[in-house]
Amino acid sequence: MTNQSSENVLKLPLEIAPDKGYKFNWFDWFCLWYPPGWLILFNRHWQHYHQDPEGWNWLEYILFLLPGGFYLALLIRWLRLGCRAPKQQIDEFDPQYQKAFSKELLAPIVKYYFQGELNQLENLPQTGPLIVTMNHAGMSFPWDFLTLAELLTQARGWTVQPLAGTSLFEHPWMVWWLPAGWSKVLGGVRAEFSAFEAGIQQRKILLYAPEGLRGPLKGWRRRYQLQKFDVSFMQLSDRYQVPILPVICVGNEYLHPWTINFQKLQRLFKLPFLPLSPLMLPLILFPSMGVWAMKTRLRYYIQPVEHFSTAASFNNSRQKRTNVYQRAQQLRAKLQMQINQLVTGQ
C-alpha cells in the first residue's frame, strides 16, 4: 500500500497524480459484497493515504471475515499497541481526502449497493451556502446521509459536510472500528450548536437532520413518521440568512429494518441507539458489520428552497422563540405530507 506522512493527507490534488489513487481490486469487491468486509474497505482506503502503524493489519483483517474473529483481532491489536487504545493524531477536515474517499470508495457503494438517485433536480440550487435538511431513519451507520452527500457532490461538485452525533467522533467503539479522527477528516461537524453556527458563519453547505436522534430512534413501527424538529437550523437560517433545502429520503427505513430500540442496553453502553432486530445475531458474530447496512434503494426528493426571516417585531425573545418553533413544526407538517404521498404512491 502507498503510505504518506501522517501529518499530511494528499498533498497534491488527485488530478495531478491519478496513478496514486486507490484502485479497487478483487479483494475490495469481495469486501463490498461480504458484509463483515466493509470495515476493511474503510481502513484500507485510509491506510493507502496515511502512515498508520497503529491501524489494523492484514492478519486482523482476515480475522474480521470469520465468525467471532473480530474479538480475537481486537485482542491482538490491543496487545500489539501495548494494552492501550489507538492514539488520535489527525483530526482536521481535509477536503482532498474527502474527495478521494468520495470518488474512490463512496461512489461505488452508492452506485452498486444503495443505487442512490436524486429526484426533482429542478429544485436544486446551483450554489451555496445551504442548510440541507433530511429525514433520518434506519437505526444504523448513517448511510442515508453519506449517500445524499455523495449525490450532491456528483450533481454540483459541492463540498458537503454532514452534522454527526458526538458518538461518531469519540465513542470508544468508534476509536477501535475506524481510524483516529476519521469522521472529522472526512468533514463531519459535531452536532452541537456552536459547531453548527461556526459552519454557517463560514458559508458552508451543511447536511442536517432536524429530527436529531429522534429520527433513527423512532424504529420500524414509526418509520414514516417525522418526529419533532429541533429549531437550531431555523434559528441559524434566520440569523445568517442561509436558505434551507429540504430533502426527503425514501428507502432509508430499510437500512436496518424491523427494529425496536433496546433502551436499557443503549443506556448501559452509552450508545445513541441500540436496535433489536433479527440482524443482531450476525452483528454479535461479526462486530465489523457495525458500519454495514442492508441493501436498499435510496431515493431522494429535493423540495423547493425555503427562505426564512423574522420580519415581524416581537416584544421579547420568548415570543421570537415561539415563532421559530412554530415555523419549524409547520415545515415538518409540510414534509410529512410529502412523505405520505410518496409512500402511498409506491
Image (tube, rainbow, N blue to C red):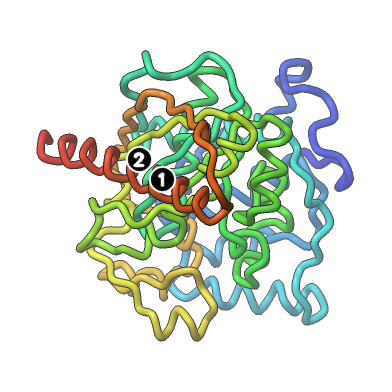
Q: Secondary structure at mark 1?
A: helix
User: Looking at the rendering, which quadrant does residue 338 occupy?
Assistant: top left
> Residue 143 location in percent, x, y?
44, 47
> Residue 249 location in percent, x, y?
33, 39
Task: Name the residue beneath numbered marker 2.
Answer: 331
Q: Is residue 300 left or right of residue 221?
A: right
| Residue 103 seen in this snapshot | no
Badge 2 crowding class, 10 Å Cα cut-off, few under 14, some 14 to 19, many 20 or more, is some
Q: Residue at x 78, y 78 (%)?
A: 84
Task: Identify which residue, 28 or 346, lies in the foreground.
Answer: 346
**Residue 195 numbered mark, or none:** none
Q: Is residue 248 left or right of residue 63?
A: left
Quarter of the image with the N terminus in it = top right
Specify the amino acid type for callout 1: Ala
Label 2 with label 1: CB-CB less than 8 Å: yes
> Residue 192 location in percent, x, y?
63, 56
Q: Residue at x 69, y 50 (%)?
A: 195
Q: Residue at x 62, y 62 (%)?
A: 166
| Cα distance in 3D space between marks 2 and 1 | 5 Å
Task: Name the residue beneath numbered marker 1.
Answer: 328
Specify the amino acid type for callout 2: Leu
Task: Relative to 43, say whether 26 is above or below.
Answer: above
Task: Relative to 315, say whether 258 is above or below.
Answer: below
User: Looking at the rendering, which quadrant does residue 240 occupy?
Assistant: top right
How many circles with numbers are drawn on the protein? 2
